[in-house]
């Protein structure tokens, strides 16, 4: 998780503060789930009314990313060894009132992991190869000079799947001190606990923050089938096959012509 | 009307899937094949993760073969003993295929092997079928006589040990060739998400020299056993069987197959074979030629967390 603000800046007098609430804290994934829009309302409390910027970061559960690069071998394009990036969120959106680069400097954004370019996908510094699940030479490491290409490719491909995004005008002030943000959640969004971090910036510095959580969970039949398939895979497999064979048999009797 | 698939974890259009199931079912009824080679690429194209598409197709193929094998067995055109020997080989092949597929996924080479298998096997089978059926059509146009069929069976079939009598096929041959054939089809079924009828049927006719009347029924019987095992193994080892997806495809597939079987009576056998050959070639080329073009995106995310 990104680093928190130093505790020293909270107790000062006239200190600005930020507060926010999600209109929905549980996203229920059922059979007609086609994605959702998470709406967030918040308020900036600042007795001195200094110019403020708000950044809302929605982050899904971390999922290691396996990525390969295609290269040409004997006329055929084949995948290289897959490279594993650790610490990549399964879902990430940074919405803000202005482009992030105008709100704060590089160092602050990097420390707060604000923006897809600042995600701490920690491929360990030294080149190590490990044996995983009996497969030799899986690289879990920095990739020398090409490292940035690989990193950008992760972000590009995740963005293409609507799993990563940066919305430079996703947060709007609707009234004095009152802001609203709308976060699109695609049907492909991973299941799990999400954190929503609301950051208040003034003069390029983060001055207040608030964390909220959001749960994306399967419900009903989808949840039952998913849990069955993952917790008791063999009984699920047998039942699924019995169902399929039974359906085939039933169909042939229904269409019997003699 | 979209529906969220619990295992594939994507949202798909349900009527579209049912319609595609019906279309592929129609084609499979028309030609007397499983149709897996057509359906699996379509599912991948629709955005379903390839591992889930391949595994769920096992359930779909098992169900559709089940619905047609019953009518064949009523007509006594299933050689259960030969089917059993093929299936014994198929069981070994499908266990090996599921493990191989798991290993290939971890290596990141599953896509390559799937695409190459489609290109090579569909290319060869489609090419041979097209050559044979085009020849038959031309001969009929010229009113040329059928070439005499070589009734002499290949000697290697008889030189091998472990002979067994297959009364319904009127054969007395070694069990080794059918076992090997079954194992090969089992591997294909796990890796390509197909039943393997397009390999089995020609092999039974040209290699084993089984009578044409029992070939399709016996191949369906073997496919049921092999795909049933593959489906359970895929669910148990890889957790990739989506029963909702299989059920949707089945709904359309069963209906389509019945209409296809009725429509097939209106065409000549060699014309149907030529059409099927073109379809097989097209799918093989579509799946395989992508490997030779420079990709727009040089990087690719691997599914599964390995």
Image: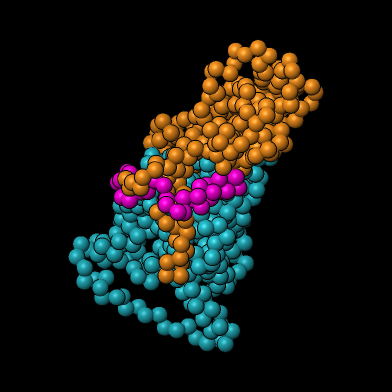
Chain colours: A orange, B cyan
Q: Quadrant of the C terminus of chain B?
A: top left
Residue A224 on image: x %, y %: 51, 28
In the image, A242 versus A199, the foreground residue is A199
Give, as a single range, the part of the protein colored magenta. A131-160
* Above or below: residue B50 compared with residue A60: below
Seen at 29% across and 64% down, the residue is B177
Question: Does the magenta run of residues contain A137?
Answer: yes
Seen at 44% across and 39% down, the residue is A122
In the image, B80 versus A75, the foreground residue is A75
In the image, A157 versus A7, the foreground residue is A7
- Please indicate whether residue A6 sits to the left or right of residue B238 in the image: right
* Above or below: residue A133 compared with residue A230: below
- Say which quarter of the image contains residue A123: top left
Question: Does the magenta run of residues contain B13?
Answer: no
- Please indicate whether residue A65 sits to the left or right of residue A199 in the image: left
In the image, B208 versus B233, the foreground residue is B233
Residue A204 on image: x %, y %: 65, 31
Residue B189 on image: x %, y %: 41, 55
Seen at 40% across and 35% down, the residue is A233
């Amino acid at each position: 998780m990104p680093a928190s603000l130093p505790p020293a800046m909270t107790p000062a007098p006239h200190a600005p503060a930020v507060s926010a609430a999600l209109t929905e804290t549980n996203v229920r994934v059922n059979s007609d789930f086609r994605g959702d829009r998470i709406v967030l309302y918040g308020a900036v409390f600042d007795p001195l009314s200094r110019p403020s910027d708000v950044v809302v970061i929605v982050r899904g559960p971390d999922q290691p990313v396996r990525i390969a690069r295609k290269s040409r071998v004997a006329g055929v394009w084949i995948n290289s060894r897959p490279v594993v990036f650790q610490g990549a969120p399964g879902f990430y959106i940074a919405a803000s009132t202005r482009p992030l680069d105008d709100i704060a400097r590089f160092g602050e954004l990097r420390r707060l992991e604000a923006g897809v370019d600042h995600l701490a996908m920690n491929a360990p510094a030294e080149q190590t190869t490990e044996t995983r699940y009996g497969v030799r030479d899986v690289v879990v490491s920095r990739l020398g000079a090409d490292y940035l290409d690989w990193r950008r490719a992760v972000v590009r491909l995740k963005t293409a799947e609507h799993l990563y995004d940066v919305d430079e005008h996703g947060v709007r002030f609707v009234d004095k001190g009152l802001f609203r943000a709308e976060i699109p959640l695609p049907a492909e969004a991973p299941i799990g606990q999400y954190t929503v971090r609301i950051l208040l910036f003034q003069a390029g510095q983060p001055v207040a923050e608030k964390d909220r959580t959001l749960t994306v969970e399967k419900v009903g039949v989808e949840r039952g089938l998913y849990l069955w398939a993952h917790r008791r895979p063999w009984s699920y497999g047998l039942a699924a096959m019995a169902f399929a064979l039974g359906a085939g048999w039933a169909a042939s009797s229904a269409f019997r012509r003699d | 009307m979209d529906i969220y698939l619990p295992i594939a974890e994507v949202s798909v259009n349900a009527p579209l899937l049912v319609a595609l199931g019906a279309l592929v079912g129609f084609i499979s009824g028309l030609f007397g094949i499983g149709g897996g080679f057509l359906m699996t690429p379509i599912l991948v194209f629709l955005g379903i993760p390839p591992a889930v598409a391949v595994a769920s197709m096992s359930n779909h193929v098992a169900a559709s073969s089940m619905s047609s094998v019953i009518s064949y067995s009523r007509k006594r055109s299933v050689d259960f003993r030969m089917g059993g020997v093929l299936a014994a080989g198929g069981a070994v092949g499908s266990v090996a295929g599921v493990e191989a597929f798991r290993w290939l996924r971890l290596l990141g080479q599953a896509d390559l092997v799937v695409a190459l298998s489609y290109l090579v096997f569909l290319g060869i089978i489609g090419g041979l079928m097209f050559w044979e059926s085009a020849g038959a059509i031309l001969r009929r146009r010229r009113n040329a006589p059928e070439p005499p069929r070589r009734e002499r069976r290949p000697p290697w079939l008889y030189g091998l040990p472990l002979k067994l009598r297959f009364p319904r096929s009127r054969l007395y041959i070694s069990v080794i060739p059918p076992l090997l054939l079954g194992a090969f089809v089992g591997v294909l079924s796990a890796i390509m998400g197909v039943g393997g009828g397009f390999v089995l049927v020609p092999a039974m006719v040209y290699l084993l020299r089984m009578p044409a009347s029992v070939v399709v029924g016996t191949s369906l019987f073997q496919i049921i056993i092999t795909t049933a095992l593959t489906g359970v193994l895929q669910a148990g080892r890889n957790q990739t069987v989506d029963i909702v997806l299989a059920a949707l495809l089945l709904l359309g597939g069963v209906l389509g197959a019945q209409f296809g079987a009725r429509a097939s009576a209106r065409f000549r056998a060699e014309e149907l074979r030529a059409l099927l050959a073109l379809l097989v070639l097209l799918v093989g080329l579509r799946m395989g030629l992508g490997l030779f073009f420079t990709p727009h995106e040089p990087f690719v995310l691997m599914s599964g967390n390995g």
